[in-house]
Amino acid sequence: MAVAGRKTDIGPPHYESFLPPIIKANYGKWAYHEIPEPGVLVHVGQSGDRLYTVRAGTPRLLSIQTIRLFADLADKYCDGYLRFTSRNNVEFLVTDAAKVAPLKAELNALGYAVGGTGNAISAIVHTQGWVHCHSAAADASGVVKSLMDALFPHFVSMELPAKLRVAFACCLNMCGAVHCSDIAVLGVHTRPPRIDQNELPKICEVPTLVSSCPTGAIRPATVNGKPSVTVEDEQCMYCGNCYTVCPAMKINNPKTAGISIWVGGTVSNARHEPMFSKLAVPFLPNNPPRWNEVVDAVVNLVDVYAKHARKHERMGEWIERIGWPRFFKLTGIPFTKYHLDDFTHAGETFHRSAHLKS
């Protein structure tokens, strides 16, 4: 008796159903890949098949009109196949080499620059910012637009010592990849939350609120005869977790929130174990619409790195080679007490790599 195959709508469809035919045919059989020009990759299969990838930078927040535009370009040049990268680039998968130049020309004409491959700055991965996030210490889209306007020459060329990945997260909850990027821009709150004691009993559950704090800074209390909480300021790390579960814990403060810059992170396992980003600039003010202080600081970091790093040396590897004292001297960043890492838990002992020792 034949048994019907089980069908379910639980979980995503298998990724293989979305692969272009050329990738299915050469899956696990690619011989090598090259970058013939900025923004263009070519993968060559053992069969001799060639797949050209044309990468263009996009804003993270896309309108439906933009998505339809990309879909039309994919239909026109690559049989409808495209993909988005984790750093907000759109990649068109082209099998006909003759279509690469026309696709590039049309993308550039529409305002979507082609680049971000090889020894270049890719598009900046970033979080929601003021557009959507309730706990953002800084905007994301506005800061990233300002940064990429200044860093654009490094997106469309491949003249840096190695690839340089930039990330932005608008608060310490870090929806972006700021823990593992060469240069990371992070929005920071600098004051404990202000408690709205009138609203808290109406909209918040005290046990949930107390347990939301990763440092135990929030303590149950009775205020005005009602269940509430207090905050031990010395233990608060201004992460905003409490505000997520209780809007009466008002963490946002436009006068005291700002931006910090971190450097040296990487997830690569190729030549070095993964490294966490470390603090470079503790605080810069929120100055929309162009965030000049932040842009100047990041451009300075890129320029110094480009001048002094060796070929193929990532930001963290360069700093590791020259040492942090020389890094601060070359960049002109003042060393302060905020650079001292006195966190006593297991951050430096976590195994962060696939490398094993016998």
Image (cartoon, rainbow, N blue to C red):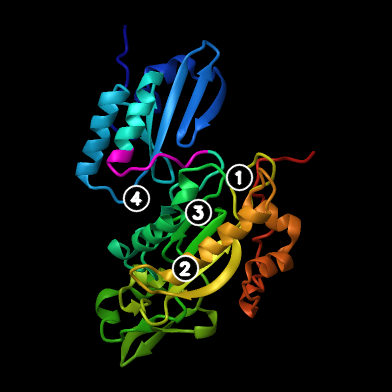
Q: Disc 3 marks which residue?
A: 166
Which residue is at 30% across, 21% downward? 79
Residue 146: % across, % down: 39, 61
- Residue at the top extreme? 1
How far is disc 3 from disc 4 in space, using C-alphas?
14 Å
Work out whether residue 235 can be spotted. yes
Answer few, some or many: residues within 10 Å of disc 1's Cα (few below 14, many 20 plus, some between 14 and 19): many
Position of 176 relative to 248 (above/below): above
Name the N-terminal-most of marks 4 and 2. 4
On residue 294, which mark appears?
2
Q: Which quarter of the figure is the N terminus placed in?
A: top left
Residue type at the position of mark 2: Val
Give the residue number, with chain letter if any, for mark 1: 162
Q: From the viewer's perspective, is the residue at label 2 or at label 3 nearer?
A: 2
User: What amino acid is at disc 4?
Assistant: Arg
- Let me know if residue 45 is in the magenta part: no
Looking at the image, tell me whether mark 1 or mark 4 is earlier in sequence order.
Answer: 4
The amino acid on which the numbered mark 3 sits, given as a three-letter code, is Val
> Compared with residue 40, is residue 66 higher up or lower down, i.e. above or below?
below
Q: Main secondary structure of the magenta part?
A: loop
Q: Quadrant of residue 312?
A: top right
Query: Is 204 or 168 nearer to us in this picture?
Result: 168
Q: Position of residue 328 (x, y in %)?
A: 67, 69
**Screen quadrant of the C terminus:** top right
The span shown in magenta is: 108-117
Disc 1 residue type (three-letter): Ala
Residue occupying the point 32% across, 22% down: 6
At which x and y percent is residue 225? Answer: 31, 91
Residue bearing the label numbered 4: 60
Instruction: Determine the secondary structure under disc 4.
Output: loop
